[in-house]
Amino acid sequence: MKSFFKTLGAAVLGGAIALASYTYLNPSSDESTDLVVSTSIPEPVAQATQVNYTTDGTEVPNVDFTAAAERSVDAVVHVINKTMAPARVSPMDLFFGGGTPYREAIGTGSGVIITPDGYIITNNHVIDNSNELQVTLNNNVTYKATLVGADKESDIALIKVDTDEELPFIPFADSNTAKVGEWVLAVGNPIGLTSTVTAGIISAKGRDIDSRDSNVQSFIQTDAAVNPGNSGGALVNTRGELIGINTAIYSKTGSYIGYSFAVPSNNARKIINDFMEYGFVQKGMLGIRGTDLTGNIATELGINTTEGIYISEIVEDSGAAQSELQTGDVITALDGVPINKFTELAGYITSKNPGDTVVAAVLRENTILSIPITISKNNTVTIPKIEMKLRNLTKSEKKKYGVKNGVKIEGTLGQLKRYNMSDYVITQVNDIEVKNIDDVQAILREVAPRDVLLIQIKNSNGDVERFRYSVD
């Protein structure tokens, strides 16, 4: 997950204490719930209550947000996360055996009811490491909630309350159709002020608020006022439809100073559909590496456009490799959605599943081509438990390292970051041969904190090494 607690960086909105782990509780197999995507609501319900005029006589209506607020405020809940945190005890208390090593801590945030039978979407950091979850509706009715699924990388989580009554909910909008300059409302529970509605416009799309990390995000940026406690709340359009989940602010102080960011509704809906169907997130990739076009790059490459993604490499064994894409192509759109920068491409692909097909508009030798590409499974996974970023081996890499199976070390984190392991593959963990990253994750699921792993690695020279790693 993108780290939002950075100096002069992105401040996570929630009051929930960010802790180290999260839990998947899968819904029962006989439970089926359809998410509602609004397609039939007519013209915006916001009404012109007064007409102003520009200097050229053009009518400019003032927009009334009351209908959109009424549609959404009852479907946004107050989420309370009860967890255990280390207690503050004095050295004397510890010496004499007094004091309590842990105490109950309470964090708060927001959530959005998305189905009448009680499914609620929120942020991962709002519910992280919870012992007990409670949600309070706008009518002050409180329910206990259970965790269905959580994804740290996207900061999206799904929780569920059980009730015999149909709950108010917000239908999903198509976030791809949201436009810069469009009016939006942010609904949530900032700094203890429950059921708060603020208004603003979409300031930008496809924002990545920390380009220094490897997790490419594609946020909707808005100037609607949000603060700690808004995390997991709704960003809605003037029809009262959900176009985003408020997630972060960019601030020097941790409070709102003009910019906030939301996970687009298409991406959030795809993630929670995965939770409901699979219990985990299915992540896909297009299979290209490249760069955003600029005027200078376009001139250097002799390309007659300055917007799009220049393809410098096509990843082996990917959907792109199986398509008609070529290095040197420029992707300008996917399924008719303009793609001007890599964050927009990443955001669009995040809303798709492995196996889905997208049609790329590709500029090649001053001609626009339509090329279908099948989304392939993303075989690169960051595993914090062993502080490594791993990827499945390609056919050529298996030949290069002289192995039949294994996983490639793409990068290292934390204490391992000081070591250059980019030329190594992992072949065994605890004397068990690993064929792919699924095998590694299966082994790690059985590992407890402070267990010691024995990891066997091999480089392209044929050197085999074994090292011990203590799991946090």
Image (cartoon, grey):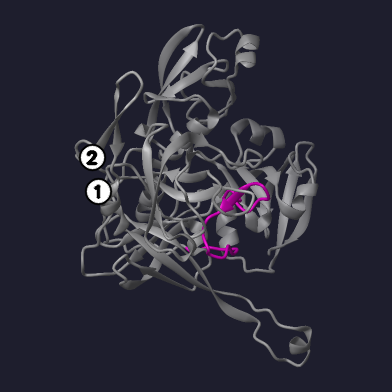
Residue at 52%, 12% in the rendered image: 305
Question: In this view of the protein, which residue sits in the foreground, 311 or 166?
Answer: 166
Q: Residues within 10 Å of mark 1 (few under 14, many from 20)?
A: some
Q: Tell me how far mark 2 sits from mark 1, CA to CA.
A: 9 Å
Q: Residue at label 1?
A: 67
On the image, the x and y values in percent for residue 437 come to: 58, 48
Question: In this view of the protein, which residue sits in the foreground, 193 or 118?
Answer: 193
Residue 406 makes an appearance in the image? no
Residue 18 within the segment the image draws in magenta: yes
Q: Is residue 19 left or right of residue 40?
A: right
Residue 64 makes an appearance in the image? yes
Residue at 52%, 17% in the rendered image: 330
Res. 121 image quadrant: bottom left
Q: Badges 2 and 1: C-beta atoms under 8 Å apart?
A: yes
Indicate which label's residue lies in the foreground, 2 or 1.
Answer: 2
Q: Residue at label 2?
A: 47
Q: What is the secondary structure assignment of the residue under circle 1? A: helix
Q: What is the secondary structure assignment of the residue under circle 2? A: loop
Residue at 43%, 60% in the rendered image: 189
Above/below status of 347 relative to 199: above
Number of numbered markers? 2
On the image, the x and y values in percent for residue 185 come to: 37, 46
Range of residues picked out in magenta: 1-23
**Prevailing SS of the magenta stretch:** loop
Residue 11 within the segment the image draws in magenta: yes
Q: Quadrant of the C terminus?
A: bottom right
Tag 1: amino acid: Ala
Residue lying at the far bottom of the rendered structure: 96
